[in-house]
Amino acid sequence: MAVFKPENVEDFFEIGEVLGSGHFGQVRQVRERATGTCWAGKFLKIRKIACSRLGVDRSSVEREVEILQTLRHPNIVTLKDVFESRAEVVLILELVSGAELFDFIAEKDNLLESEAIEFMKQILEGLGFMHSKNIAHFDLKPENIMLSDKVSPNPNIKLIDFGLAHCFHQGEEYRSSSGTPQYIAPEVINSEPLSTASDMWSIGVITYILLSGLSPFQGETDEDTLKNVIAMKYEFFERDRMTAEECLLHPWIKPI
Ligand SMILES: Cc1ccc2c(c1)c1c3c(c(C)cc1n2CCCN)C(=O)NC3=O
């Protein structure tokens, strides 16, 4: 069992504003007392009763930490430290001080195709690195694609939130029904074995929205959205989904 720092996180960090929250707990801005540097603290409530809907299993926290420790890439958020108290684990993560990608785009009058290509290139570079380590994110959606800062004319993309991520081992079959309906692949809905290709489906949906402003499968309810995803009312010229590496070589991303 992984052992995290037993010290009180507040001895080392001043806890600041809430940046986000979910069933897992909260993400708050934290300020390192020794240096004044700001980080993002992901405060995870550890589930004490297996059937509880609130909080997370300690085993899934250990998996998220192990995956983040494996992933060091300019387009993936970095993990600095992990603290544990009686009922809480706190991940100290790189503070990604820009906005969510789609909020950044919404604030612009228009998005140039060259800007969309640059964003997609960085997303694919982070994803390609992750997939090269046999790690799939399994929750790729606009909310988990952020920009490094608000002021740079060419902000860096940062993939965040690895709470559903999974590292595949040789010959292993993995199934999961988690994810966000608008972005999950048909194999997730059909409870079939998953792979890194499931992330490529989500990337396809995100690209569609980035270029058109429309969500291809969204229905009135989550149930309708899921029905739209598996209704297969679309045609693809290529039968197999491209990998992130193949996308980076596509003429739209890498002009000849
Ligand atoms: C400035 C800002 C605002 C909201 C933030 C974050 C940063 C943020 C961060 C992270 C996560 C998992 C969630 C976060 N959220 C919650 C919303 C993410 N879509 C993270 O890992 N680093 C962040 O900066």
Image (cartoon, helix red, strand yellow):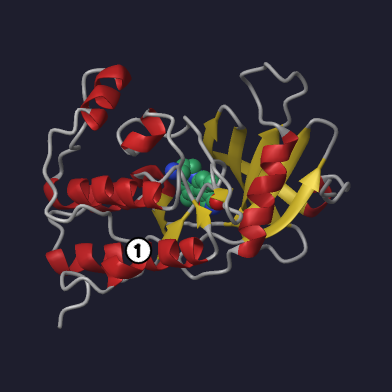
**Where's residue 225, x and y in %?**
26, 25
**Vertical placement of 74 versus 77: above or below?**
below
Judge from the rendering whether residue 120 lies leftward or rightward of residue 98; answer left or right: left
Kindly indicate the quadrant of the structure image that contains residue 170: bottom right
Q: Name the residue at 18% across, 37% down.
A: 216
Query: The residue tagged with tag 1: helix, strand or loop?
Result: helix
The residue at which mark 1 appears reads as 244
Q: Which residue reaches farthest bottom?
A: 256
Q: Is residue 155 visible?
A: no
Kindly indicate the quadrant of the structure image that contains residue 156: bottom left
Q: Name the residue at 29% across, 71% down.
A: 248
Looking at the rendering, in which quadrant would you find the N terminus?
top right
**Where's residue 140, x and y in %?**
40, 46
Q: Is residue 120 visible?
A: yes
**Where's residue 67, x and y in %?**
62, 55
Q: Name the residue at 80% across, 54% down.
A: 12
Foreground pick, 113 / 2: 2
**Where's residue 95, x and y in %?**
55, 57
